Amino acid sequence: MKLGDLVLGRYVVERALGRGGMGTVVVARHDTLGHRVAVKQLDIADSQEAESRFLREAQAMAAIKSAHVVQVIDFGKHEGRPVIVMEMLAGDSLADRLDKTGVLTWPYALRLGAQVARGLADIHARGLLHRDIKPANLMICSGTPEVTKIVDFGIAKPLAPHAPKLTMAGIVVGTPAYMAPEQLLNLELSPRADIYALGTVLWECIAGGLPFGADYHAAVARVARDAPPVLAPTGLPAPTAAVQQLLCRMLAPDPTARPADCHQVANALERLAAGQTTPAPAATSPAPAPASGPTLVVARLPAAALATASERQWLTGLLDASARSYTLGDLWIAVEPPRPDADAMTRERTLAEKLQTRFGPTVRCRAATAPADFRLQPSALVGVGRLPPLLASLVQAV
């Protein structure tokens, strides 16, 4: 797009703005109404996969109506390449703000983070993961008060297990410095991956650096390690113990140890920014902790069962929506949430019958009920850490 170009027959290009995921962004003016918009054009020509991803980005953004997510106005093609037309945001990206100030005071950072968490909650409610939360993708819009908005959905991903995948198997997408351990390891993701990224952003805002460094090799160190305490530079107020505790939870290597959703994160950040150190009272009495933990399932399958997308989708369909599944060589591992009526032996027989019907009588399957405190660290699935003893015994049994 060049200065003076008429995009989609109604937007006149005025100046370059920058680059986003996969595209160039310009400022344009509606030729009759006069308002300004941001127009993003796909940089990659003649790539069906890139165009599909770009269209998915537009559809994802258009589906979300949130005070903390940039809004899509229009979509089409200019000179044969797709363009997305978005609301024009006045202000600084968080990356620019940090370049100017170095750090933010922790109450300000927490208020900003609460707005991002609200936006993420709206994104997750539409069945999407952002997967690239970082300062460059957060816009601090001018006004009183300032409003923070999430931008750039170039690598957003549907949460639905049967949604089409536009990323090649084995390819990790995102920005390593902000990626959760499970994202670095290319494992199954949940909204807690975005929570981890937001925790990293807040750590950076307060400390003026990244907890594990910026390059990929330094980022991999977080797979089996907790983040260090966040320390404010000399002369700025130190974060409270409650702030440290929340950031520690957001940056837990085990996704199940992080807050359950972004509503919880936003509420906690708002309370802490306001100086409240105790949790808000629950609306109802909390449910009693389950007497037992999740049901673990391990099956050894033919290579074709794990190499084919349709077969992996079929395997996912055997599980509840809240279950997690992983592959480890020729092993399929599932972690199903605790259920009062669950019986591991019955579950083993049911799954074994289905697996053997589909993949042959040689398939072996074992299941067991784990203790309530069971945790499966992502690092254990790539050899960095050890499998929990019960899971290791199931692997040996198949």
Image (spheres, rainbow, N blue to C red):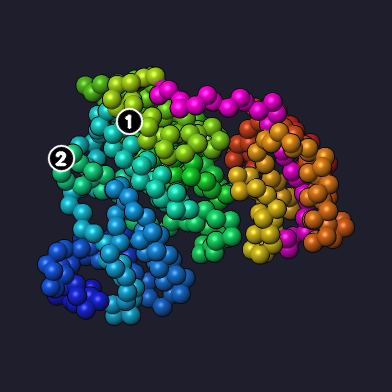
- Residue visible at 54% across and 64% down? 164
> Which residue sits furthest front?
284
Quadrant of the image containing the C terminus: top right
Q: Which residue is mark 2?
A: 144
- Residue 319 to residue 46: above or below: above
**Occupied quadrant, residue 240:** top left
Coordinates of residue 344 in the picture (x, y in percent): 78, 38
Question: Relative to 23, is 387 on the left or the right?
Answer: right
Residue 270: give its label: 1
Q: Is residue 353 magenta?
A: no
Mark 1: few/some/many CA within 10 Å (<14, 14-19, 20+): some
Coordinates of residue 256 in the picture (x, y in percent): 56, 35
Coordinates of residue 229 in the picture (x, y in percent): 41, 25
Question: Relative to 223, is 202 on the left or the right?
Answer: left
- Residue visible at 69% across and 36% down? 339
- Residue 210 to residue 244: above or below: below
- Residue visible at 37% across and 25% down? 243
- Residue visible at 83% across and 57% down? 356
- Residue 301 to residue 369: above or below: below
Secondary structure, mark 2, is loop
Q: For this rendering, which residue is in front, 329 or 397?
A: 397
Query: Disc 2 marks which amino acid?
Result: Thr
- State the separation of the CA atoms marked 2 and 1: 18 Å
Query: Disc 1 marks which amino acid?
Result: Glu
Look at the image and give the residue range highlighted in magenta.
279-305
**Occupied quadrant, residue 115:** top left
